[in-house]
Amino acid sequence: MEEVKRRRLLDKYVINAHGISIDIEVISSEEKSVPLYLVSITNLTETTKLILEKIREEFVSKLDLADIEQSREEEVGDLKKHFTLSITRLINKYFPQSDEKTKNTLINYLLEENLGLGKIEILLKDKNLEEIVINNHVEPVWVYHKRFGWLETNIKMHTEARIRHYATMIGRAVNKEITVLNPLMDAHLQNGDRVNATLAPISTKGNTITIRKFAEDPWTITKFIKVGTISYGAAALLWLGIQNELSVIIAGGTGSGKTSMLNVVSNFFPPNQRIISIEDTRELMLPGNLHWVPTETRLPNPEGKGGVTMLDLLVNSLRMRPDRIVVGEIRRKQEAQVLMEAMHTGHSVYATLHANTAEETITRLTNPPIEIPKQMISSLAMVLVQNRNRRTGKRRTLQVAEVTSSGDARVLLQLNAIKDSLDKVAESEQILRLISLYTGMSKENIEQDLKHKEEILKWMVSNRIFDINDIGKIMARYYLGTLKIK
């Protein structure tokens, strides 16, 4: 009874992996400094689990991981066929009365446990997770949950060899290799997941694997509003700026939600314009009705050939007649120069940058290593700063700022951390001046337009329009002038 009091259930749900129901519980415990993410297979009896473990041990005794690691990709396919036959014989031996569906479920489960990523496959099926981290075989696997932040799981790797085996398998699937001589690997999987792996002794506690999951269900403006990341007023101002082709930089620290906000920004693009996106690793997901060309950088091969850089793609994008250019992250001087030139020649640009405030964003852009002349910065219209509270895990828009004609940042909306609200701290001058210049709208017209946009956003949230493609359709109707809300 005392143990029950010390634990509190924060969330509970079920996921499905290879036909097997998996119970997920998130629990806070007085004994742990972070909540626990507990995985439990529910539709297998204890007896079945014991027999499966016996089959697994019998199978593993004949399994040589070294052979699998050294096999070529086509040979691994043959090995899987061979092992499927072996496992099928064992399943028939221990579960003679089972129907074909049950046998297939058990076969898939055992194959993943021994030739796949084991229980990591379960974590990959959970859409609530953003990150999966293996630090070594001593510590439990950690996950980053969308609602609860970092959680410690009840899953452990049995050996360092197993972690290395997983890293080798992942690399082989995308023609990458990780060895003692090449102990670092950064791989981008076909499903969009990004994997980084390191081998000891480079990582001194043991082998590591970090999997950043590709968001199958991406963040949208209505989701951001619902969870409190951004206010209706700030979202309406952002929409107004994007509709009128003002360029925006999204700043923030690591894990603050910069890329998620970049994805949200794309919700407001009109469908009759051409969008080119440029990323190191594909993370953006835009509405399906947009005229969108996603591009991605490529690392050179072992001989140093065939690499395609961010700068290569940026320069090339200007030859593709883009209306909007979306850039994953600005890191270098040449990239920033090309982007600023693109803004000056009439292209709308949206990009992310590592900086913690609007003022720091301008400082980073105008000082080494990026070092853009301050007079060029005025072509940028808005800066959004994202922040993640390390204590609570909440992601919030910290600041919305306009860039003045002198190239300085002027904060319009500022997060009040105590009230958890985005408060107005100054009236817009530059954004309103630009929109008035481009459209002829008076200040009163612009205020009415902002109010109308807020009404549409409230209607979308109240009608639970959260899907990215549904939002794309709403925006298309808005720009066509056929949207009517009740």
Image: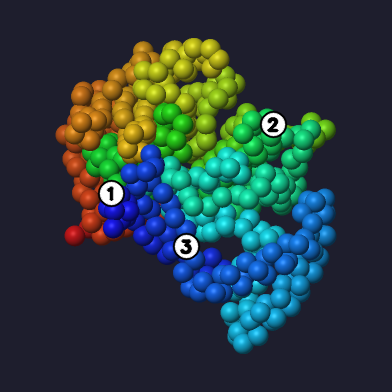
- Asked if residue 293 can be seen in this view, the reply is no
Task: Tell me the mark number nearer the camera, choosing from 1 and 3.
Answer: 3
Residue at mark 2 to residue at mark 1: CA–CA distance: 45 Å
Q: Please give the label number shown on residue 201.
A: 2
Q: Please give the label number shown on residue 40.
A: 3
| Residue at x 64% of width, y 61% of height | 113
Q: Amino acid at mark 1?
A: Lys
Judged from the image, the secondary structure of the residue bearing numbered disc 3 is strand
The disc, 2 or 3, on the residue closer to the chain's N-terminal end is 3
State the residue lying farthest toward the bottom: 97
Q: Are marks 2 and 3 in contact (CB under 8 Å)?
A: no
Judged from the image, the secondary structure of the residue bearing numbered disc 2 is loop
The disc, 2 or 1, on the residue closer to the chain's N-terminal end is 2
Q: Are marks 1 and 3 in contact (CB under 8 Å)?
A: no
Q: Amino acid at mark 3?
A: Ser
| Residue at x 36% of width, y 52% of height | 27
**Residue pointed to by mark 1:** 226
